[in-house]
Image: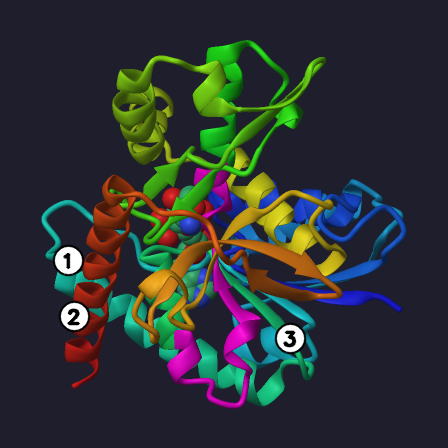
Amino acid sequence: MAVRVLVTGAAGQIGYALVPMIARGAMLGPNQPVILHMLDIPPAAEALNGVKMELVDAAFPLLKGVVATTDVVEACSGVNIAIMVGGFPRKEGMERKDVMSKNVSIYKAQATALEQHAAPNCKVLVVANPANTNALILKEFAPSIPAKNITCLTRLDHNRALGQISERLNVHVGDVKNVIIWGNHSSTQYPDVNHATVTTKGGEKSVRELIADDKWLNGEFITTVQQRGAAIIKARKLSSALSAASSACDHIRDWVLGTPKGTWVSMGVYSDGSYDIPPGLIYSFPVTCEKGEWSIVQGLKIDEVSRAKMDATANELAEERSLAYSCLA
Ligand code: NAX
């Protein structure tokens, strides 16, 4: 049976990169038919229709149907997976609170539509920024969707960290694993390599053993990952799109089909208090996935430096949550 996948903001640049990946099987595998539900706002309706035309023209064998609409109820009806890319971008001169207020109202409304019209057990991935807080608002206003079904994207940051290690060591990125992104998808995120390993001819080696340069690992590596989004904007004059789309596919694929044995990935999920991160935040943790369920990797040793960085990004998320709630008041 075809799986119905909603992509909001589908006429935007991530949407344009993402929908063909889904239609080709990059998200749910090469044997899983899909029906795409694409939502955007009325000013983008014509562009959205153009994307639909291109999807038809691409003649994807797995694509069993396309719904392109500006009606949120039609978009959410019967969807099994919802990828929330649509949102209000920060424009020059806008206060943080104004952007937050716009996104809070979008995510509040879309939460209700998903709760009422999506398929039972719909899995939700929020990509649009502020991703963690948008996901939290969605969770608050869709109380009948289990909290474990609502996540946000930090896989792009995770993949960026893998990419930096692989470039530095000149090894294939597929041989690097178990980096962690802790916290917020923002510049306070903490990319942690303390548990990361590389598969070498001589077996599995820790990244800290292979890269003796602590100054780079504790400094430039972290800031490069944190600031990578800004570096892409500077170079492309547009924000990351193909890497964001590809990471969204990775996030859902691993969630639905499982993580490889011995490998974890980073996902923004509802905190249960693991690693003393306050419950009630959507925070990025290392997780493994099996049979469509994620679980936070337990028992990792956290040193003092990591602790401080993990708490700092949690504090920022708590502040964002207060700001979001003040917009609701
Ligand atoms: P674009 O501005 O190209 O596209 C956004 C689309 O959303 C537009 O077509 C717009 O009309 C639509 N939209 C606006 N309000 C909507 C609503 N209420 N319902 C449905 N659609 C709506 O942005 P793009 O570059 O595609 O980025 C999309 C979002 O992803 C942004 O919020 C961006 O900040 C965020 N990102 C998140 C990343 C992550 O790792 N979590 C990384 C990439 C990206 O920066």
The residue under the point 26% across, 49% down is: 307
The residue under the point 15% across, 45% down is: 92
* Amino acid carrying mark 3 in the image: Cys
* Region of the chain picked out in magenta, as a range: 138-158
Mark 2 and mark 1 in contact (Cβ < 8 Å)? yes
- Looking at the image, residue 88 lies above or below residue 209: below
In this view, the residue in front, 250 or 170, is: 170
The residue under the point 39% across, 13% down is: 212
Estimate how packed mark 1 is, as few (under 14), some (14 to 19) or many (20 or more) residues with alpha carbons within 10 Å. few
Q: Is residue 131 left or right of residue 293?
A: left
- Looking at the image, residue 116 lies above or below residue 151: below
- Residue 299: x and y, percent? 48, 55
Residue tagged 1: 96
* Amino acid carrying mark 1 in the image: Arg
Mark 2 secondary-structure assignment: helix
Whichever of callouts 1 and 2 sits on the residue coming sooner in the sequence is: 1
Whichever of callouts 2 and 3 sits on the residue coming sooner in the sequence is: 3
Quarter of the rendering occupied by the C terminus: bottom left
For the residues labelled 1 and 3, the Cα–Cα distance comes to 30 Å
Residue 184 magenta-highlighted: no
**Residue 138 is at least partly visible in this image:** yes
Residue tagged 3: 122
Residue tagged 2: 323
In this view, the residue in front, 53 or 261, is: 261
Q: Is residue 290 left or right of residue 91?
A: right
